[in-house]
Amino acid sequence: MISKEQVEHIAKLARIELGEKEKEKFSMEISSILDYIDKLNQVDTTKIEPISQVTGLENMTRNDEIRSSESLPCRQAGEIRNNILEEAPAKKGEYFKVPKILE
Amino acid sequence: MELENLTIEKIHKGLMKKEFSAKELVRFYLDKIRKEKDLNDFLTITDKLALEQAEKIDDKISRREKVEKLEGIPIALKDNILVQGHKATAGSKILENYIAPYDATVVKKLKEAGAIIIGKTNLDEFAMGSSTENSAFGTVKNPINKTLVPGGSSGGSAAAVAAGHSVVALGSDTGGSIRQPAAFCGVVGFKPSYGMVSRYGLIAMASSLDQIGPFAKNVEDIKTIFNTIKGKDDFDSTTIDSKTRDNHFDFENLKIGVPKEYFGEGIDKDIKENVEKAINKFTNLGFEIKEISLPYTEYALAVYYIIAPAEISANLSRYDGIKYGHAANNQNLLEHYLKTRANGFGDEVRRRIMLGTYVLSAGYRDAYYNKAQRVRAMIVNDFRNIFSSRDKIDFILTPTTPTPAFKIGEKKNPLAMYLSDIYTVPASLAGLPAISVPCGKAGKLPVGLQIIGPQFKDELVLEAAQSFEAME
């Protein structure tokens, strides 16, 4: 079970604004999913190590070398950078524009 | 020449014999998509890109240059895969006007192989769903019966191939999102082993599970696409070098496992009958069939609905209305976040982000997330034991879905929707290769047979699927 107040709390943590009716709806729906998930408590996992992935690969690094632009997914160096900046909802020159944080 | 229902091989021969040009072929598909747009399987049709690519192939043919197998083959891509200069919405309002700044690795490889990208297909928002009803741009209809869902989340790609709107398509599969819609639409859909195909340029959902894979009308075409897109990629550190793995196998005297847990409560009677019939056909190939048990199967869906939302909540935190995508334009930063994400995300996405935030939050992490990671290890072990020396099973056969395609609007309860992935989720959690191939009809609706193989034995799964297809 998850209460309306708990939904309010996690919605705030997740940075999602909810209306009053939505809080009730999500509290009911998430509760029923959690009820289902609770079946995991039937499983004894005391001797089992948790896993977060399945390939067995660890700390995959590459050599710290300069690569030619042909190896990049974009045809011209710098093109990808401009394309990314193009998508910013608000920008000033070559910077992302962010609402004021400190009052 | 008839341009409908062509396979890669037939198109290649047709182009070589000049029975049609690549441009004529592409125009035929683009027209057909538009004529039957009520299916709502495409979100973007990339006419200009497709016709430009086709012209290049036609020039090559007229110059009598060598033309490779995939050159001139129309392909559709799920709209969470980036094609530079084209929209990639992921079926979400938050990315409604987002233009991809670069090509996904799979797109780069397909372009280099000469495949022709004809458009981007509809999907459940951020690939979260099993029916495409969660798309912000309307539900896709099943080409077999327009009152039914095509499955999801890659419903647009499955419908496009089934309707003959594309020869082949790419989708992404996190818990069944390629295999389940393939089963519902009566086409072949393959989820490779986790790590076989680069996800660079795939809009991330749950990163320990996401995998790109192909849809086609036959296994041969699936193989061609898979062989083109697979391989280690510097831009996705989870990819493995398949050349270093032992892929050798003799396709004879194999032992097939049939897990009893996949035929229990909730399975449709016609599905069960068809799949059992399909399994028996494998004895004709001289294979031994053995009933097996994967005892932790019943916990797979519960594990999935902790791990996937946890990863979703982290991955989707990037949609902040600052770097790209929809922005609420509020002067206060917190308000800006709250409003951007409230307006940009649909119900299922918000539900999963909140569920994920909850299972990762202080005080609940051990009980939910860590517990799920442990049970996931047990599910992986289930499969390992079956494939290992103990049982020596070579591959597993199951139904792809418990029921055939359901009605649009039928499953209003989120949990009821989740249950339609009950047979596809376990292989996802274990990162195993799995394919859905058509095996008969339940009434008038297609049934899918799922073939699951050991990790990185993707070729074996494809071989088994092709042998079955040849008997059908």
Image: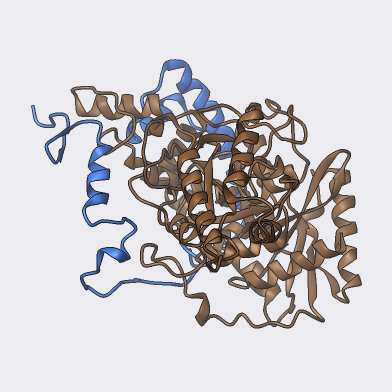
Chain colours: A blue, B brown
Quarter where residue B329 is shown: top left
Name which quarter of the figure residue B331 lies in: top left
Location of residue B286 in the rendering, given as x and y in whole percent from the top left corner: 88, 77
Task: Please state which of residues B27 and B403 is positioned toward the viewer in this rendering.
Answer: B27
Q: Is residue B427 left or right of residue B466?
A: left
Question: In which quadrant is the C terminus of chain B drawn?
Answer: bottom right
In percent of width and height, residue B197 lies at: 50, 63
Q: Residue at x 72, y 70 (%)?
A: B463
Among the 4 quarters of the image, the one containing residue A8 = top left
Please give the name of the residue rendered at 25% of the width and 31% of the height, measured from the top-left corner: A89
Which residue sits at x=27%, y=44%?
A83
Spot the residue most to the left: A103
Instruction: In the rendered view, tell whether residue A68 sits above or below residue B179.
Output: below
Residue B345 lies, with reference to residue B153, above or below; the image says above
Say whether residue B379 is visible.
Answer: no
Instruction: Tell me the residue at 66%/68% (across/down).
Output: B383
Give the image location of residue B282, x and y in percent.
86, 68
Residue A100 visible here:
yes
Q: Percent position (x, y) of residue A39?
A: 62, 47
